[in-house]
Amino acid sequence: MPDPSAPSPPPPRQQSPRSDATLTGATPPPKRSKWNSRTEFLLATVGNCVGVGNVWRFPYLCYRNGGGSFLVPYFLALLLLGMPLFLLELALGQRFELGATHAYGKLHRRFRGVGAAGTLMAYVCLWYYNVILAWTVVYAAHSLRPRVPWGADGVDAERFWEAQVLHESSGFDDFGERGPASAALFFALVLSWTCLFLATRHGVHSAGKVAYVAATAPYGILVLLVIRGLTLRGAAEGLKFYVRPDARKLATPRPWLDAANQIVYSLGVGTGQMIAFGSYNPADEDVVADSLAIAHVYGARRFADDVRKATGRAVPRFFLFAWSWGTPAFCVLLAGASFQSAFADSTYEGARSTASAKAIGFLLMVGPACLMAGGAFERPSPSYCAVEKPAASVELTAVAAASPTKGGGRLARAASGAEFV
């Protein structure tokens, strides 16, 4: 029994209701918004992948690269490059709930540049993409007239495009020879930017509502264009061109590069868009997709086993192969094709590329790759890793990260200090 003469212990200290961020004087990070529903997320993602490039760019690439034979590198690029990277960026944003720059910085401090470059690329694309939308608005307004101006009174489409829409001059020394800038094009550009502002004014809450119309309308338009195209004169000859492909084109690097570029362009990977979309998902939306975010840092097979044990849902074998071997191998082949294309003789409006221009292009390709490769032998970001790794285990960690086998998982555990001697 306790001694009644002993002094009673002091009452427990009351915990301050203030958070750690308040005690340290730091401002707690604001809570990130979430999609109103999974349907809005799916529609916004699909709408990001279907746009002008599917109507305008893809048919041209098919025609230039042998018709139906272009579908071979296209679907191969979709399976080995597009789908794994697409899910990788979605899962990366969902895991860290951050934008591209900070999400890549969580993996490694040097990867911040990758996210910043992608964000800058998205801004550059946004500027010219809104100009294309302005052209579309001008043509849509003219199409409502009883007689379209590009097909009436002998005025052909090219002349209408250059003189009426663009007010194109003959050169740098002749600005304004067609008069002032097109007022119709200016107001169309203002309208496109205004619509963009209104659609994203309240973040994902307003963008998700717009996606119900913006993501479904392109499919209806594509169906109408297909019906219209099949009823035009010469449609049978066009279909025969796709049925009888030119397989000789596949022996050149151009179709493979065009296919990879089209996949990246259509899916929007590499510009931070998918990372931003995924960052507005709940953290527990899809655990299997999260496996992509650390496939090469943690060991693909080891992490797949952890996902199966935790959720009871096995990672598809195809994605396990793609994360470990398929996507890296395909990227290496594309890099080789890019090098070959960089040193090939190229001309622009009759002018042949000089040796200095080729050297600059080579440095632009090799320089960033060398910087990123050097970061693989440094310590991963402590904010991402649960255990701080000893300095002596850096090279061992790099080997474990590249290994897709269970042996790689053991190396990763040893590098983390659990079995380090």
Image (spheres, helix red, strand yellow):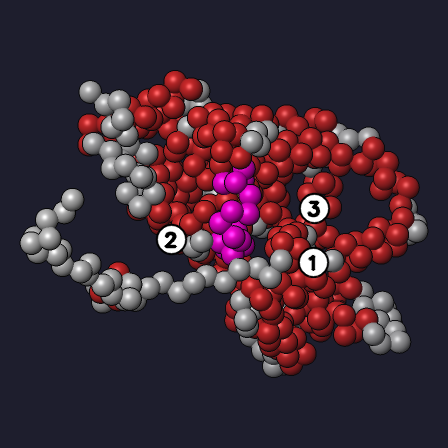
Q: At x 78% / y 64%, what residue is drawn?
A: 157
**Residue of label 2:** 102
Which is more toward the observer, 9 or 335?
9
Whole-Å distance between the Cαs marked 2 and 1?
28 Å
Q: Is residue 177 above or below residue 347?
A: below
The percent position of residue 330, horizontal first and vertical second, equals: 53, 29
In the rendered structure, are the residues bearing label 2 and label 1 in contact, judged by CB atoms less than 8 Å apart? no
Whole-Å distance between the Cαs marked 2 and 3?
33 Å
Residue type at numbered disc 3? Phe
**Residue of label 1:** 215
Residue 7 lies left or right of residue 234; in this view the side is: left
Residue type at numbered disc 1? Ala
Residue type at numbered disc 2? His
Q: Secondary structure at mark 1?
A: loop
The percent position of residue 218, horizontal first and vertical second, equals: 74, 57
User: Magenta segment range?
Assistant: 276-290
